[in-house]
Image (cartoon, grey):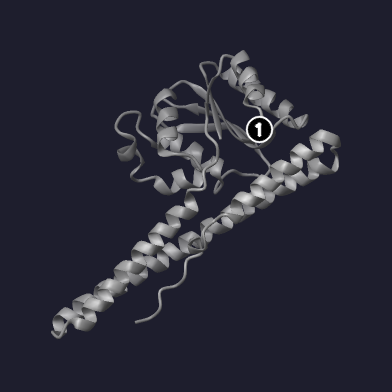
Amino acid sequence: MIVVMFDEESKAYQASKALARLDATSEISVYAVAVVKKNNDGSVSIVESNNVFAAGAIEGTAIGALVGLLGDVPVTGAAEGAMAGSMLDVDRAGVSAEFVKDVSDKLKPGKWAVVADISEEDITLVDNQMKAFGGHIFRQTWQNVEEEQEAREEASIQAEMKDLRKQEKAESRAEKKAEFHEKIEELREKWHNKLEQFKMRSGERKNETEAKIQHLKQKLAKSRGKTKSTIQARANEIQNRNKKAPETAQPQTIPSA
């Protein structure tokens, strides 16, 4: 993920076109790019975007999550506090909370930015182009944190459920048993909602990955020599990182009492 900041609108558009040219020659692969503006009220508006996703929109994708966060995060305060209500989107974007805060702190009202989801082997290619337009670059390699977050949430809820069942079984008083039973049912409902959320986000990740792979396959068919090997390596990297998700990232329903 890269975010390149500019003081002028025209420079942001020029930078976006420069990324497109690098993609056209396969020096990098651009999966999604958006030109955004930070408004006076702190919100962020997408004024231009382009992507490889089938629906033709960035909603539900990693870059969509990142763009949304740039308008949601306060420009002051600790990263932990700023991220408290948006951790799922941080995980979805594949970046750290610190990265989002660093960008948000610098993206002041009236400034412009190019946000892009890319594959690159040599960062100087993009850096040189962006610096030529006066851009300030933020970059972070994709992190597989969303599946880990889901696994942690599942483990926590399963452990709490087990403890409540144990207490319910050991309790002899009817009113206390009822209290434990009510808590178990509330937790079961909470897990059901989490399960549906995980399924939806898993589907979004799968669709996003498939769109990127298809984009690279189309380029692969027209490529030769070293360029062909480079594109194949990018496709392999995207496929392999999605195979590394822990098994617990596929949540199981909590059994009935």
Q: Position of residue 172 (x, y in %)?
A: 15, 86
Query: What residue lies at 29% left-to-right and 31% top-to-bottom?
Result: 77
**Disc 1 crowd, CA 10 A, few/some/many (<14, 14-19, 20+):** some
Quick check: 128 above or below 49?
above
Q: How many numbered marks have been drawn onto this rendered protein structure?
A: 1
Q: Position of residue 54 (x, y in %)?
A: 68, 49
Left or right of 6 in this view: 80: left
* Residue 54 visible to an observer of this rendering: no
Q: Position of residue 75 (x, y in %)?
A: 35, 28
Helix, strand or loop for disc 1: loop
Query: What residue lies at 21% left-to-right and 77% top-to-bottom?
Result: 167
State the residue in front, 179 or 157.
157
Query: What residue lies at 26% left-to-right and 73% top-to-bottom?
Result: 164
Query: What residue lies at 44% left-to-right and 33% top-to-bottom?
Result: 99
Quick check: 169 above or below 107?
below
Quick check: 89 above or below 34?
below
Q: Pick the quarter of the image with the N terminus.
A: top right
State the residue in front, 228 or 190.
228
Left or right of 104 in this view: 1: right
Q: Position of residue 168 (x, y in %)?
A: 22, 80
Q: Which residue is mark 1?
A: 120
* Residue 68 visible to an observer of this rendering: yes
Left or right of 191 in this view: 207: right
- Amino acid under label 1? Glu
Report which quarter residue 206 is drawn in.
bottom right
Q: Pick the quarter of the image with the C terminus.
A: bottom left
